[in-house]
Amino acid sequence: MVRESAQVVVVGAGPVGLTVALRLGLANISCVVLEQEAALPEDLRASTFHPPTLDMLSEYGLSQPLIEEGLICPSWQIRMHDTGERAVFDLSVIENDTTHPFRLQCEQFRLSRLLHERIKSLPSVEVRLGVTLTGLEQDDDGVHAIWKSASGEGRIDAKLLIGADGARSTVRKLCEFGFEGKTYPETTILATTTFPFEDHMEGLSNVNYVWTEGGTFSLLRLKSLWRCSLYQEESETLEQALEPASIERKLQKIVPSDTPYQKLQWRPYRVHMRIVDDYRRGRVVLAGDAAHINSPSGGMGMNGGVHDAFSLTDEIKQVFAGGDLTLLDRYTRRRRPVALNEVLAQADRNRSRMQERDPAKRREIFNDLQTMLADREAARTYLLRASMITGLRQAAAVD
Ligand SMILES: Cc1cc2nc3c(=O)[nH]c(=O)nc-3n(C[C@H](O)[C@H](O)[C@H](O)COP(=O)(O)OP(=O)(O)OC[C@H]3O[C@@H](n4cnc5c(N)ncnc54)[C@H](O)[C@@H]3O)c2cc1C
């Protein structure tokens, strides 16, 4: 068994693990990133970057290339499909609170790629693809990560181990963190198409959450395609809902088309709301989806994970500058309440709002949103929260 050492082991080369690695590498803290996949994952995941995430990434020259690969979204909307009425959330009301007063529509793998490229120039960081963390132990001296790959197995002795290994986190399971919460009943089917919805639905934004008779869908635009969130119908099995004919029927209900939709990709996913009780167990700390998961409604999971990575690395730098391990508890104190009260709670409200079926209740919600949006200061307060700025400000105020 190969035996090596590093100051930090990061498990997972998603956007969170790679952000941790970049910030540690720039601080000359030696770091090995273990990623079980042979290549960085490029599956259909996050597509929305919020303003403060772009503000943070711009410190490393990463926002501009993301903007070039994505679509700027100056406003987003909640819409009634039948009438075309829309509540428009205009991000210019927060123009004094961020240097990026817009949502950016861009696939999360583009951030991972950019981070990986930057990391390659840092001598203190090594990203190992095709290497799976299978075990860990910790004692007073350090934490010992056991890994396996196609070519063998080994052990890395480190001072800290960061579990950024996603929703099914092995690190979380090995350290027996509780992961309380719930799983929502519905299955969402995310489908991508090149169909130009913008030519058929008046006043569409690049991000649209839509109520339709008896249901809901969302339309999120990327540079060359639209992402549509559709739902399995009660009369369908999941297998039936994933048939191209079922996806076609649901897309045709949004905008009828004489020619079949060009469907590029589709995947089902279930949505959960869960969080660990503490982000640290000794020398092991969790970040991103490993620590908390939420409905993608509002686009906050990856953004919140990147914010975790910034907060955690601030504390790690102090630990390696001679500080005590308990400094890492400030990361939990700062980030856990934000995940719970801002990310999970807002995502839960966003999901419930769009799952509302009662037309009278929908109308009441819609009217309330319109009243709020007509008041610039109320709209600013709402959008500071929805854009995750309020949560970051709350975290910064925690000692
Ligand atoms: C359909 C969908 C849409 C979404 N939209 C948005 C959005 O618009 N905005 C937003 O902010 N969020 C969104 N999210 C959430 C976002 O995708 C996640 O929050 C984000 O991927 C979390 O990043 P992460 O780095 O914590 O975990 P992941 O991206 O899951 O990365 C974890 C990595 O760890 C690796 N790994 C796992 N176990 C091991 C092991 N034992 N050893 C080595 N490696 C391991 C995995 O292979 C993976 O590469 C969406 C999610 C879904 C499903």
Image (cartoon, helix red, strand yellow):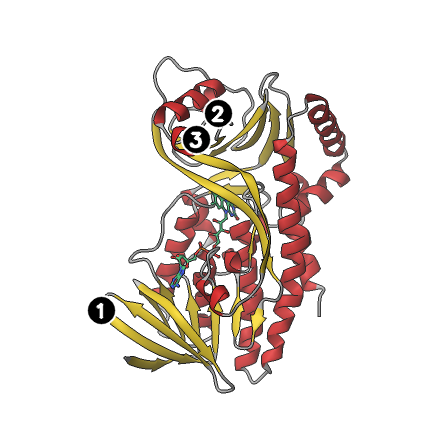
Q: Calculate the distance from the C-alpha at mark 2 to the C-alpha at mark 3.
A: 7 Å
Is residue 72 or residue 181 the one in the foreground?
Answer: 181
Mark 3 and mark 1 lie on one chain; the one further toward the N terminus is 1
Identify residue type, mark 1: Ser
- Could you say where residue 382 lies in the image, as x and y percent from the top left? 71, 42
Q: Specify few, some or many for label 1: CA neighbours under 10 Å numbering under 14, 14-19, or 20 or more.
A: few
The answer to the question of whether label 2 and label 1 lie on touching residues, with beta carbons closer than 8 A, is: no
- Judged from the image, the secondary structure of the residue bearing numbered disc 1 is loop
* Residue pointed to by mark 1: 151
Q: How many marks?
A: 3
User: Is residue 55 among the parts visible in the rendering?
Assistant: no
The image shows residue 155, relative to residue 274, as above or below, that is below
- Could you say where residue 195 lies in the image, as x and y percent from the top left? 40, 24
Q: Residue at x 67, y 67 (%)?
A: 333
**Residue that sits furthest to the top in the current view:** 258
| Location of residue 207 (image quadrant) | top right
* Residue pointed to by mark 3: 237
Q: Specify few, some or many for label 2: CA neighbours under 10 Å numbering under 14, 14-19, or 20 or more.
A: few
Is residue 179 or residue 330 the one in the foreground?
Answer: 179
- Judged from the image, the secondary structure of the residue bearing numbered disc 2 is loop
Q: Calculate the distance from the C-alpha at mark 2 to the C-alpha at mark 1.
A: 48 Å
* Residue pointed to by mark 2: 235
User: Is residue 240 among the parts visible in the rendering?
Assistant: yes
Identify residue type, mark 2: Ser
The image shows residue 84, relative to residue 274, as above or below, that is above
| Location of residue 177 (image quadrant) | bottom right
Q: Residue at x 67, y 59 (%)?
A: 337
Q: Calculate the distance from the C-alpha at mark 3 to the C-alpha at mark 1.
A: 41 Å
**Residue that sits furthest to the left in the current view:** 151
Is residue 69 or residue 317 the one in the foreground?
Answer: 317
Q: Is residue 118 left or right of residue 88?
A: left
Q: Is residue 219 left or right of residue 324?
A: left
